[in-house]
Amino acid sequence: KYALKQALQCFQAAARTARDSLGKDHPNVAVSLVKVGFLLLRSRQYQQARVTFEEALRIRLSYFGNDYPHLLIANLHNNLGICELYLHNFHKSDKHLNRSLEIQRSILYTERIKSTEEQLRLRLLEIADTLSNLGGLGLEWTRKEGPQKAGITSK
């Protein structure tokens, strides 16, 4: 637990340094924030992890644009979906996980011709991970609210 706390402090310091030296919207700030978010998630600080991932997503969307399907954006939606799941915000979790899945599928479709088998295999594993998270959401949502109220919208 001490090592986790120490690692979190180091990553937070790195994020502050990146923000102070590169500016608040620089992509490297998002990289540092994602590391902070993972440690917060791991230490079950879901609210703080969500805020951190949201800031990283804001930076990446401003850098890549809203319409460009990028794996880094898909991964952040997946991370936010997990945070919302743990916070029992099931509709928000569903929204983020499905957005992640939509981006991942779009990337798979557009890159399928020029990708190696290994790259395609990695894309499929990312999709499988998101589908697994959607399944976990469905189980938890049904457990908490009953099968009639669980509104999973996976496409």
Image (cartoon, rainbow, N blue to C red):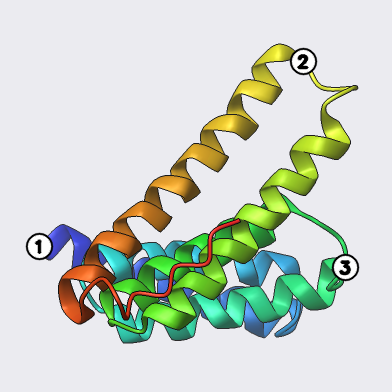
The residue located at (78%, 47%) in the rendering is: 106
- State the CA–CA distance, disc 1 to disc 2: 40 Å
- Dot 3: what SS? loop
Q: Which residue is mark 2?
A: 116
x and y percent of residue 100 in the render?
A: 61, 59
Q: Which residue is mark 3?
A: 67
Q: Amino acid at mark 1?
A: Lys
Looking at the figure, which quarter contains the C terminus? bottom right
- State the CA–CA distance, disc 3 to disc 2: 25 Å
Q: Which residue is mark 1?
A: 1
Q: Residues within 10 Å of mark 3 (few under 14, many from 20)?
A: few
- Dot 1: what SS? loop
Furthest residue in direction front, as rendered: 148
Indicate left or right for 69 with 91 as reference. right
x and y percent of residue 128 in the render?
A: 49, 38
- Dot 2: what SS? loop
Q: Nearer the viewer, residue 63 or 14?
A: 63
* Contact between labelled residues 1 and 3, with CB atoms less than 8 Å apart: no
Q: Nearer the viewer, residue 86 or 61?
A: 86
Circle nearer the viewer, 1 or 2: 2
Q: Residues within 10 Å of mark 2 (few under 14, many from 20)?
A: few
Circle nearer the viewer, 3 or 1: 3
